[in-house]
Amino acid sequence: MAAKLVPVLMTNQIYSKDRFFPAYFSRIMTEIFYDQIREGGYSYKNRSVTHIFVDELHTLVSKKRSSPAEDILNKAVAQSGPARLGFYYCDQNYSKIPKIMRDNTKYIIALGHNSKEEAELIVNNFNMPKSRIGEILSLDKQKQECIAATSERFLVYDISQNKKWYE
């Protein structure tokens, strides 16, 4: 971290040890988060924006008990704007994402789900019409069909007619 580089490692050996990986991830996340908000930190002084991508987020957080990784992730996601953090995650289990993170998720690309409960949660969190539940459940996974939703607005481009508009 002293060189202002974030370690990107093949974490297979650490990841396979459930008790080690959350602490390892927490350490890196804590360094990144506090460098963004601490006066005197490189990122703070330079007003740089940091983007964090996490695959299978639910493996770092647990509804049963809090983990060091979950604590710092909740703080980072809740304060991401002032801290100049972009936080992105991929997960097949939306219901296992802590509520504070789901509530701070502005965009979602939902692929087909088998679970009506998961589809209902997505529809409710993004204030979509109830009819979208059936649409999410019927998306073709083989064709990679998806539905995009936002709590804000999308800028839509129609390149065939050279038009753009907000939806």
Image: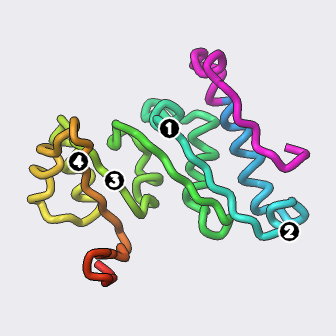
Question: Sequence order check: which comes first, mark 4 or mark 2?
Answer: 2
| Residue under pointer 2 | 45
Identify the residue at horizontal 50%, vertical 36% (top origin): 61
Q: Please, what is the dominant secondary structure of the magenta stretch?
A: loop
Residue beneath disc 4: 145
Callout 2: helix, strand or loop?
helix
Q: Amino acid at mark 2?
A: Lys
| Label 2 neighbour load within 10 Å: few <14, some 14-19, many 20+ | few
Disc 1: CA contacts within 10 A as few (<14), some (14-19) or many (>=20):
few
State the residue in front, 46 or 36.
46
Q: Position of residue 63 (x, y in %)?
A: 43, 35
Q: CA distance from mark 4 to mark 2?
A: 43 Å
Indicate yes or no whether the magenta region holds residue 69. Answer: no
Residue labelled with disc 1: 55
Reading the image, the residue beneath label 3 is 109
- Sequence-wise, which precedes: disc 4 or disc 3? 3
- Quick check: 61 above or below 139? above
Query: In the rendered image, is residue 59 in sight?
Result: yes
Residue at x 28% of width, y 78% of height: 167
Q: CA distance from mark 1 to mark 3?
A: 14 Å
Q: Earlier in the sequence, mark 2 or mark 1?
A: 2
Task: Estimate the x, y position of residue 164 in percent, counting from the top left.
Answer: 33, 82
Q: Quadrant of residue 137?
A: top left
Disc 3, SS: strand
- From mark 3 to mark 2, how far is it between C-alphas? 34 Å
Q: Which residues are magenta?
A: 1-22
State if disc 2 and disc 4 touch (CB < 8 Å).
no
Q: Is mark 1 in CB contact (under 8 Å) with mark 3?
A: no
Q: Amino acid at mark 4?
A: Glu
